[in-house]
Image (cartoon, grey):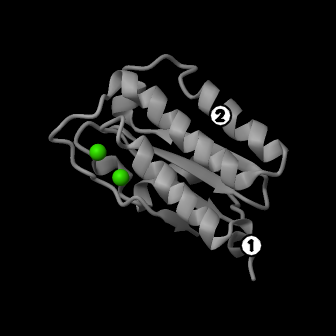
């Protein structure tokens, strides 16, 4: 089995999906998580590549956010679309990043991702509150490379 398959159990994957659904109850923003083993390009560049592959730049308010994780590289990137970057301060993702980092350091990957997703939802809520005519624009599922 690859390290990506070993990284999370099925139950843990389900918990992450539930976190995405819960987070998106607070915000019109769309959150996705992509996990892969490693990459040969800089992680930020790779996150952008995945963001485009998952067609995450197609949301109406350009407010999708990707949590990208390269398991073997021990790296992750939080990548938000244009619509988010236009209205938030530069250090906007800092607290979400800290939350994830803290759990990852303790080897608690599922909890790191779950708490990171929920935190991202909380942070997005201030700028992109959930609306009654909100549409779920991107699938609430885990993406694996
Ligand atoms: Ca939405
Ligand atoms: Ca969604």
Is 129 placed above or below 103 here? Answer: above
Residue 102 falls left or right of residue 16: right
Residue at mark 1 to residue at mark 2: CA–CA distance: 23 Å
Relative image position of residue 82 (x, y in whole percent)? 37, 33
Indicate which disc, 1 or 2, sits on the residue closer to the N terminus: 1
Query: Counting other residues with Cα less than 10 Å from the Cα at mark 2, is it few (<14), some (14-19), or many (20 or more)?
Result: some
Q: Is mark 2 within 8 Å of ligand 2?
A: no
Residue at the far right in the pictured view:
106
Query: Counting other residues with Cα less than 10 Å from the Cα at mark 1, is it few (<14), some (14-19), or many (20 or more)?
Result: few
Residue sitting at 78 percent across and 56 percent down? 73
Can residue 79 be seen at all in this image of the molecule?
yes
Relative image position of residue 116 (x, y in whole percent)? 59, 40
Residue at the far top in the pictured view:
89
Residue at the far left in the pictured view:
133
Residue sitting at 74 percent across and 60 percent down? 71
Q: Considering the numbered disc 1 on the image, is that residue within a helix, a strand or a loop?
A: helix
Is 141 placed above or below 122 here? Answer: below
Is 124 placed above or below 115 here? Answer: above
Is 61 placed above or below 140 here? Answer: above
Relative image position of residue 14 (x, y in whole percent)? 54, 64
Can residue 31 be seen at all in this image of the molecule?
no
Which image quarter is the N terminus in? bottom right
| Count of marks overlaid on the render | 2
Q: Considering the numbered disc 2 on the image, is that residue within a helix, a strand or a loop?
A: helix
Residue sitting at 68 percent across and 34 percent down? 99
Nearer the observer, 46 or 56: 56
| Residue position marked by numbered label 1 in the rendering | 6
Residue sitting at 43 percent across and 61 percent down? 53
Which image quarter is the C terminus in? bottom right
| Residue position marked by numbered label 2 in the rendering | 97
Relative image position of residue 11 (x, y in whole percent)? 61, 68
């Amino acid at each position: 089995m690859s390290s990506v398959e070993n990284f999370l159990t099925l139950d843990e994957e389900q918990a992450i999906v539930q976190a995405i659904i819960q987070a998106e109850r607070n915000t019109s923003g769309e959150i996705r998580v992509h996990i892969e083993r490693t990459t040969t390009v800089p992680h930020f560049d790779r996150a952008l590549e995945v963001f485009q592959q998952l067609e995450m730049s197609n949301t109406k308010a350009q407010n999708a956010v990707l949590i990208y994780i390269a398991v073997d590289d021990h790296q992750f990137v939080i990548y938000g679309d244009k619509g988010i970057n236009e209205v938030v301060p530069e250090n906007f993702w800092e607290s979400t990043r800290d939350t994830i980092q803290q759990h990852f350091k303790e080897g608690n990957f599922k909890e790191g991702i779950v708490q990171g997703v929920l935190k991202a939802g909380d942070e997005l809520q201030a700028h992109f509150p959930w609306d009654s005519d909100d549409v779920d624009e991107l699938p609430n599922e885990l993406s694996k490379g």
